[in-house]
């Protein structure tokens, strides 16, 4: 399924500004899935770290707690737009269904003493409804062709 818009966490904006999150360092990024009962969509959650989130999808049926490592991570510039992007993330349901409402991207590392800073969250179905992959099917979070996050525009006078 195509991911909804990615929304940056409040602390992610601060961490980008102070250099804690460096999007040019394309390693150690992960995507994790969360249930409808999670606080994952609260952009001002706690101190903006992975440990602040509640109700991750259980580590069963083909999903591993903590999510999957992102591949194809890039930070590129074209014209006046800079883009953070990655390949689609997926899990194959095995022995049961994988059910989720939100996907979260976070840095799976300790940076400037911040343990696993959060970057952004996506509501997977804008109805909103849970998204389900039944046994033997693939749960795929499809990244928008324009990327996860973009920065563009001229500075104001």
Image (cartoon, helix red, strand yellow):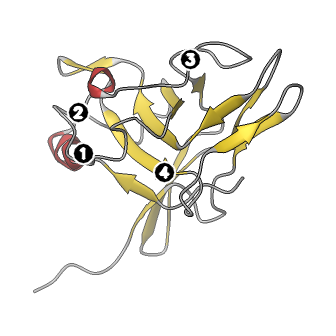
Mark in front: 4 vs 3:
3
Mark in front: 3 vs 2:
3
Using the image, tell me which numbered label, if any, was put on residue 122.
Answer: 4
Per the image, label 1 sits on a secondary structure element best described as helix
Residue 87 appears anywhere in the view: no
The residue shown at (50%, 52%) is: 123
Q: Which residue is mark 1?
A: 16
Q: Position of residue 63 (x, y in %)?
A: 66, 20
Using the image, tell me which numbered label, if any, was put on residue 58.
Answer: 3
Per the image, label 4 sits on a secondary structure element best described as strand
Disc 3 versus disc 2: distance between alpha carbons?
29 Å
Ranked by sequence position, the earlier of labels 3 and 2 is 2
Disc 1 versus disc 2: distance between alpha carbons?
6 Å
| Mark 1 touches mark 2? (CB < 8 Å) | yes
Residue 85 appears anywhere in the view: yes
Mark in front: 4 vs 2:
4
Q: Is residue 155 left or right of residue 120?
A: left
């Amino acid at each position: 399924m195509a991911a909804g818009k990615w929304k940056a966490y409040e602390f992610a904006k601060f961490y980008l500004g102070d250099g804690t999150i460096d999007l040019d360092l394309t390693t150690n990024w992960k995507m994790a899935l969360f249930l409808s009962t999670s606080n994952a969509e609260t952009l001002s959650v706690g101190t903006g770290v992975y440990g602040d989130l509640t109700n991750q999808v259980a580590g069963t049926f083909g999903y591993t707690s903590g999510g999957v490592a992102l591949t194809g991570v890039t930070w590129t510039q074209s014209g006046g737009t800079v883009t953070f992007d990655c390949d689609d993330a997926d899990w194959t349901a095995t022995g049961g269904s994988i059910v989720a409402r939100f996907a979260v991207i976070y840095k799976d590392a300790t940076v400037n003493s911040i343990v696993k800073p959060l970057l952004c969250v996506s509501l997977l179905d804008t109805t909103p409804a849970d998204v389900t992959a039944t046994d033997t099917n693939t749960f795929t979070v499809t990244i928008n062709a324009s990327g996860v996050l973009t920065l563009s525009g001229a500075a104001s006078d």
